Amino acid sequence: MIINNIFKNLKKLDKKLYVKSLILYHCAPTIFCNKPSTIITIEDFDMSFFKSWRDLKDEIYRDYKIEFFEIKLQNKKLTAIIYKQDKLETIIKRNIDFLLNFGYREYMTTKDMLKHLKSRYNYSCPHELGVFLGIPIDDVRDFICNKGECKLCGYWKVYNDVEYAKQTFRLYDEAKTRAIDIIKSKFLDNNVA
């Protein structure tokens, strides 16, 4: 059963399970790997869907130790960054010199940094978002500078260390496969009559 069919079945059965499954699948590299955060956009939801999203935050935090920060809500689209606090703090500290160029400050807390990212997101998707997502800084820089053709395209555009990227993409794919297995066994199988 492909992932789209899984989601269709869950959406018919239970909105909360549907939302929880969406988050688990799309955020699997953050939940199961070393990825500090994932950006997720959920479209075309109604008020009960939005309520399910908000109601599930605490439950998902308990299950997966991930936190949420809503970046944008516009035209029935919710964009949020879902992150592991310790990993995001580490990646920000490692790249603070770069982030200073975009108005971030060393004294800012992680929440303050996310608020600043949110304010920059109002105009367009800020390129420094790549740092928050755990993309190697050299690839973020080269993407911003439009350094010509990338060498590989997957979870990000790779301009530098292709072998590292391939290994990381494989780990992220494995995390998503793990999420699919969990969704099928824990959420779908138990709810199909």
Image: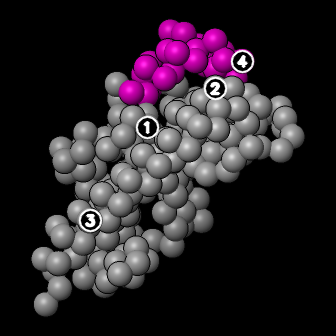
Task: Identify the residue shown where x is 56% and y is 35%.
Answer: 164
Residues shaded magenta: 87-111
Amino acid under label 1?
A: Lys
**Neighbours of disc 4 within 10 Å: few (<14), some (14-19), many (20+):** few
Chain-order first, disc 3 or disc 4 = 4
From what the image shows, is residue 83 above or below residue 46? above
Q: Quadrant of residue 17?
A: bottom left
Q: Write down the residue under mark 2.
A: 137
Give the percent coordinates (x, y) of residue 160.
70, 32
Residue 11 seen: no
Residue 35, numbered label: 1
Residue 45, numbered label: none
Chain-order first, disc 3 or disc 1 = 1
Name the one closer to the observer, 136 or 56.
136
Q: CA distance from mark 3 to mark 4?
A: 42 Å
Task: Identify the residue shown where x is 31% and y is 70%.
Answer: 18
Q: Write down the residue under mark 4.
A: 101
Q: CA distance from mark 4 to mark 1?
A: 23 Å
Left or right of 63 in this view: 154 = right
